[in-house]
Image: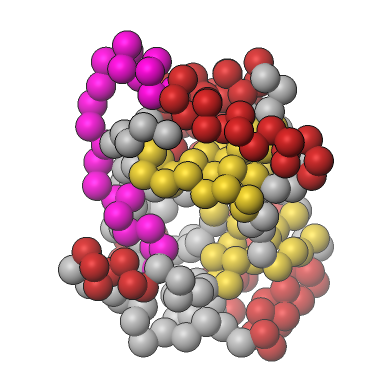
Amino acid sequence: MLENPYVFKIQRYSIHDGPGIRTTLFFQGCPLSCHWCHNPESQAKPLKTDAEDMDRVAADLMEEIQKDLIFYDDSGGGVTFSGGEPLCQPQLLFRLLDQCREKEIHTCVDTSGYGDTKALLKAAKKAELILYDIKLVDEKAHKKYTGKSIALVLDNLKQLSRQKAAVRLRFPLIPQVTDTDENIGRVIAFLKENTIYRDIHILPFHRAGEGKYQSLNIKNYMEDIQPPSEERVLKVKKQFGSRGFSVTIGG
């Protein structure tokens, strides 16, 4: 793939970004600055570009995507558009979703939910599955740990629910942040009161991206935080399960 400023990484043979074996494209740009972000290099805004250059980039990326067709077919996998935040680059995202559909390639969009509502709903109609993170419900806490208000994230999830979009909810389990009984209870209450979704995937915090903070000279708020124990993960799974949710660890 030619280097470009719009997708900063392509990860092949991924099994944690949707069903089957997948190729994950990490889009540049994210409006959030989550303290536990595993891709802090993605937070810089992408450059603006014209339609002709966008067409070239999309064609370049589709060439890369199609190299893995055999793995998609054999495993029921496909392509996941992640980031950063793919909604930061909607025109490129829409081009790729349309071209993947023409090739009958399964697509997922992995989003924080913090993005333009029209773009999100349009992406949900084009993609087979939306991977949607729900982290915190409390406004003050969400601003503290991500830099932005929670209102848009919650409203966008309501909109997806009204549209009956195919959504896989994901709950990042972050010690001392999302991993409190109060927050988990509020997340459960919000989902039950405002959405149709009753499946959730728990994503335990890990330290895989911590070296990036050193190389980029960015403050790592989580440098002293350890991943949650297996016992704690199972307890959280039970909390969701006891309220009627089908729960999966990972993915």
Residue 119 lies, in percent from the top left, at 46, 27
- Does 184 sit above or below residue 169? below
Q: Give the quarter of the figure containing the N terminus.
A: top left
Whether residue 56 is in magenta: the answer is: yes
Identify the residue at the far top of this view. 52
Q: Give the quarter of the figure containing the C terminus.
A: bottom right
Q: Quadrant of residue 184?
A: bottom right
Residue 90 lies, in percent from the top left, at 42, 27
Q: Quadrant of residue 97?
A: top right
Q: In the picture provided, is 138 more to the left or to the right than 23?
A: left
Whether residue 12 is in magenta: the answer is: no
In this orientation, which residue lies closer to the viewer: 139 or 172? 172
- Does 36 sit above or below residue 151? below
- Does 245 sit above or below residue 166? below
Q: How is the image coloured?
A: secondary structure
The magenta region covers 36-58
Residue 155 visible? The answer is: no
Residue 239 lies, in percent from the top left, at 72, 75
Identify the residue at the far left of this view. 217
In this orientation, which residue lies closer to the viewer: 104 or 192? 104
Residue 41 lies, in percent from the top left, at 30, 55
What residue do we see at 27% from left, 15% from top? 50
Residue 14 visible? The answer is: yes
What residue do we see at 68% from left, 28% from top? 105
In this orientation, which residue lies closer to the viewer: 160 or 110? 110
What residue do we see at 72% from left, 41% from top? 71
- Does 163 sit above or below residue 187? above
What residue do we see at 78% from left, 35% from top? 73
